[in-house]
Image (cartoon, rainbow, N blue to C red):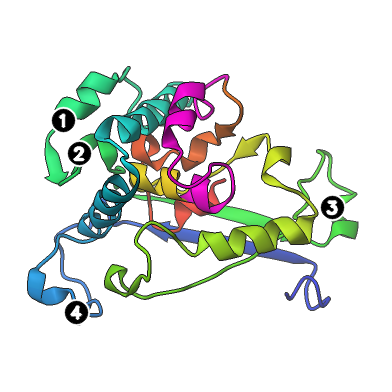
Amino acid sequence: MALHTGQCDVALICYGSNQGSGFGKLKSMAETPLYEAPYEPRYPISSYALAAARHMHQYGTTREDLAHIAVAARQWAQLNPLAHTRDPLSIGQVLASRLVSDPLSVLDCCLVTDGGGALVLVRSERARDFPKPPVYVLGTAAATWHRQIGSMPDLTVTAAAESGPRAFAMAGLAPKDVDVLGLYDAFTINTLLFLEDLGFLRQGRRWRFRAQRAHRTGGRFCRSIPMAAVCRAVTLACTACSC
């Protein structure tokens, strides 16, 4: 907004986290989720496991469907020299990996590490002086529907179902126009939910996604490598910043 209104010409957006090395050390008390705390869930994975279990119940989604997403993330990681995990991964290995919160296994979960990221935003007239072609922001949107997973009206629908169409409308584009897609994939179920909510998949039609392998290297579109948190690691908001 500051750029749009002319209050500044350049904005630096940066973030860093040491949640990997700082795990287990003293930190401020997080907000207690009033209606979930009595059940002592394992945050944050239990929340996403709940969403995955509901998607499986409602649409017949399987652990194998989610395993395909983990394998795709690993394929992209193998192309990224900065990825933390680059060894080949098979569907069988994902299915045989240790369950952390049913139905999600350890290979359905992102890595946690230290790191940081930054974006430089400038006004469009300033960008014309750059030595390399700039990337223009055509549309943006944000939406928040709930604070905790227990407040979601539908465990299989995220707020991306609202923010996505608004961003596409602002940009004058549609999902069919997208060549490279950066999805936040803290857990494999995130990828599936966001693909549905953003209009790349019809809800519950995961079989078509798996059959077409659209998300793998050489597929219809690709998740940008920095967003593959399942293999590259996640530092809270930094995964989004590094896109």
In the rendered view, would you say 95 is above or below 59? above
Magenta residue span? 194-218
The residue indicated by pointer 1 is 97
Q: Between disc 2 and disc 1, whose residue precedes?
A: 1
Work out whether residue 113 can be spotted: no
The residue indicated by pointer 2 is 106
Amino acid carrying mark 1 in the image: Ser
The residue indicated by pointer 3 is 127
Q: Residue at x 42, y 31 (%)?
A: 207
Rendered location of residue 194, percent (x, y): 48, 50
Element type where label 1 sits in the image: loop
* 3D distance between C-alphas at marks 4 and 1: 31 Å
* 3D distance between C-alphas at marks 2 and 4: 26 Å
Q: Quadrant of the C terminus?
A: top right
Residue 238 lies in the magenta stretch? no
In the rendered view, would you say 143 is above or below 236? below
Instruction: Report the mark closest to the observer, 1 or 3.
Output: 1
* 3D distance between C-alphas at marks 3 and 4: 49 Å
Density class for disc 1 (Cα within 10 Å; few <14, some 14-19, many ≥20) is: few
111 displayed left or right of 41? right
> What count of labels does the image hold?
4
Amino acid carrying mark 4 in the image: Tyr
Q: Residue at x 65, y 59 (%)?
A: 165
Q: Quadrant of the N terminus?
A: bottom right
- Name the one closer to the observer, 95 or 56: 56
Q: Between disc 4 and disc 1, whose residue precedes?
A: 4
The residue indicated by pointer 4 is 35
